[in-house]
Image (cartoon, rainbow, N blue to C red):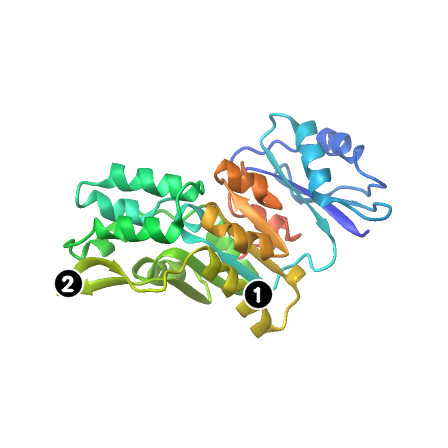
Amino acid sequence: MSHVLTLVSSPNRPVLDATLLSEISAHLPSPGEPVWLAEGVAADIPFAPMGATDNRRIADTLRLELGDLPVDLFVQASAHRRKRLFLADMDSTMIGQECIDELADFVGKKAEVAAITERTMRGELQFETSLRARVALLEGLSADVVSTVISERIKLTPGGTQLVRTMRANGAYTALVSGGFTLFTGPIAATIGFDENRANTLLVDNGKFTGRVTEPILGREAKFESLVELRAKLGLVREETMAVGDGANDLSMIGEAGLGVAFHAKPAVAAAAGARVDHGDLSALLYAQGYRRDQFVD
């Protein structure tokens, strides 16, 4: 069939069953038989709409039908479902923290910086200006604290390593593209298994942060340009790409991807994205591509 609906619940709270799949199928045009990707956790329902299809409208309608059930859903064409290029944000997406907020804690300014970060991710502040202001507060801090932050404070988002390693095992190219800093993206990308990483460079002098960052700053437009560049380099069409992020500086990248996903995102970002994950972990993006649980690379 030409289209597929994928329903995904949190692996820690499986809520899907045959009755729910049947009820949701009734709201789809010419639905096929549901296919379990992971019993209780994720399932596909193929369907065949007549004529032009508004995937977002169908998704919004089905979310209303699901009500308060903690279920994420993806509505997409079956063609090019398995993506060959994946770009991901780092902070609050591939990891659960904001690295600059954690650095600021070492100079006693975490609350101040975190408030600016939150407003920036909501789209209330211009990213580049905001980043310069936050980095300035780190002046004089020893660069050695980065290793402490990574080892003691940074937690990988569940499902992220499976997502990247499974996609790479199936021929996809993966890039960690962050408005954060290379001091973090380098080791974190290596741990997860990304092909490459791109981020900003914090300037260091005599082992201490200068309070400045290398220009130009990698922000919203640079993330968009990274997607376009890598897509062209790999000879792919738009539908073969996927991007995920949580903040306003991810919106252009998310909008340009064949499957653009807002992950536990700020309200404005979730509303603008073509797809979103509100309840599950990053493994939801594997189910969205039709991978079964037994096909994951752990």
Under tag 2, what secondary structure? loop
In this rendering, the label closer to the viewer, 1 or 2: 2
Residue where numbered disc 1 is placed: 172
Please give the name of the residue rendered at 54% of the width and 33% of the height, measured from the top-left corner. Answer: 13
Say if residue 293 shows up in the picture. no
Point out the residue furthest to the top here: 68
Say if residue 260 shows up in the picture. yes
Residue where numbered disc 2 is placed: 207
Please give the name of the residue rendered at 12% of the width and 65% of the height, measured from the top-left corner. Answer: 206
What's the amino acid at mark 2? Answer: Gly
Tell whether 226 sits left or right of 78.
left
| The quarter of the displayed image where residue 124 is located | top left
Q: Position of residue 217 (x, y in %)?
A: 37, 60
Separation of marks 1 and 2 at Cα, in angstroms: 38 Å
Please give the name of the residue rendered at 48% of the width and 38% of the height, measured from the top-left corner. Answer: 266
Please give the name of the residue rendered at 16% of the width and 53% of the height, measured from the top-left corner. Answer: 141
Q: Position of residue 290 (x, y in %)?
A: 67, 52
| The quarter of the displayed image where residue 210 is located | bottom left
Taking depth in this image into account, of 136 and 239 the one nearest to the observer is 136
Q: Position of residue 59 (x, y in %)?
A: 69, 39
